[in-house]
Image (tube, grey):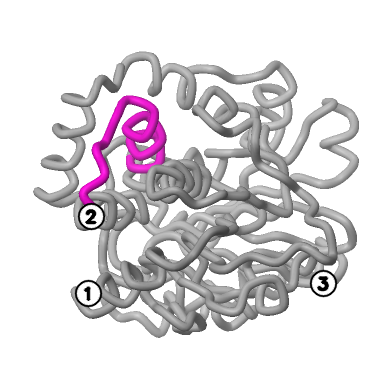
Amino acid sequence: MKKEFEKLKKLLKSAKTAVVTAHVDPDGDSIGSMLALGMVLERLGLAVTLYCGDQVPRIYRFLPGSERMKRELLLQQRFDLGFVVDASDISRIGDKIDLRQAAPIIINIDHHPDNTNFGDINYVTKSSCVAEQVYDLAKYLKIKIDKRIADCLYAAMITDTGNFRYENTTVKTFLIAAELLKAGVNTHEITTRIYDTKSVPSVRVCARALAEVKFAMGHKVAWAVVTDQMMQENGAKAEDLIGLVDNIRSIEGVEVAVFFRQEKGKVKINFRSKEKANVCEIAKRFGGGGHVKAAGAAVEGEVGQVVERVIAEVSKFIKASSYLV
């Protein structure tokens, strides 16, 4: 990555403005890394705009700078540099912004194995989270990691590693986390805000979905569905469903967990695997992608029919995987 860092450093010396974008349906890594990167760039003297097509989920709004994120940009706005964090393809930032029109140079910072290398500079590495990459970039640029940056990076890190539970957690992850704690991170405060603060609508809609979990392949596959009607009846928002698919995966005997969410004529699908299944390969069959053990897709169609198609494909995948049978 040294060449990419050197190229970026040269660009940063002449740039005056930058936009940092997160993907739609933003998660903790996307939000935390965007905010931290924005602060790093501002330390270098750039005027920074933070953008995401969807709003910051409530549980991440305590992070410094989250209130600055814009969901709309003026058509005539132009930036010297455009950064995309945590997106395997530029389409993941949504269709509200034409980044190639807004910025002549795009910097792609990501850790997804299926990244399409869409940037003019592609800082794409195998790491637990984009937060690790932003940390490394800040160190290369000799930017001091203060508490504000550290809080954002730590929140990003714990959400993409499942609070250091997932196998993407490495020695480097813990070493960076230690440095963030030295910068002043309060681990209890951040984990409480992210993992132990649920809204009443969240508890109710998730309880109903979990009560109706279905199984296939001898309990190796489990799935739940949340419809628009269920959301309306419980006064829930999309962010109230964060973590639901992980609850399904935690069921004993389940190898692949799938969560279906009906939204605006589409069905959004989240896949998770526990041990060996590569759910990214399954997601690709429905136009999606992601990581080996965490992936997603969005499909147009009636929710019942989509569920039937997807579960049939998952079952076929497991049957073809002799190590799972």
Marks 3/1: CA distance? 38 Å
Q: Amino acid at mark 3?
A: Glu
- Which portion, as a residue range, is magenta? 141-157
Residue at x 78% of width, y 55% of height: 73
In the rendered view, does 69 fall on the left or right side of 151?
Answer: right
Quarter-wise, where is residue 165 in the image? top left
Q: Residue tagged by mark 2?
A: 136
Q: Are marks 3 and 2 in contact (CB under 8 Å)?
A: no
Q: Residue tagged by mark 3?
A: 300
SS at badge 3:
strand
- Mark found first going from the N terminus, 3 or 1: 1
Q: Which of 267/191 is in front?
A: 191
Q: Amino acid at mark 1?
A: Met
- Mark found first going from the N terminus, 3 or 2: 2
Question: Does residue 308 sit above or below 119 in this rendering?
Answer: above
In the rendered view, does 272 fall on the left or right side of 210?
Answer: left
Question: Does residue 126 sit above or below 136 in this rendering?
Answer: below
**Dominant secondary-structure state across the stretch colored magenta:** helix
Q: Are marks 3 and 1 in contact (CB under 8 Å)?
A: no
Q: Which of 117/79 is in front?
A: 79
Residue 107 at x, y percent in the picture: 46, 71
In this orientation, does residue 325 appear? no
Q: Which of 69/163 is in front?
A: 69
Q: Residue tagged by mark 1?
A: 1
Q: Which of 2/189 is in front?
A: 2
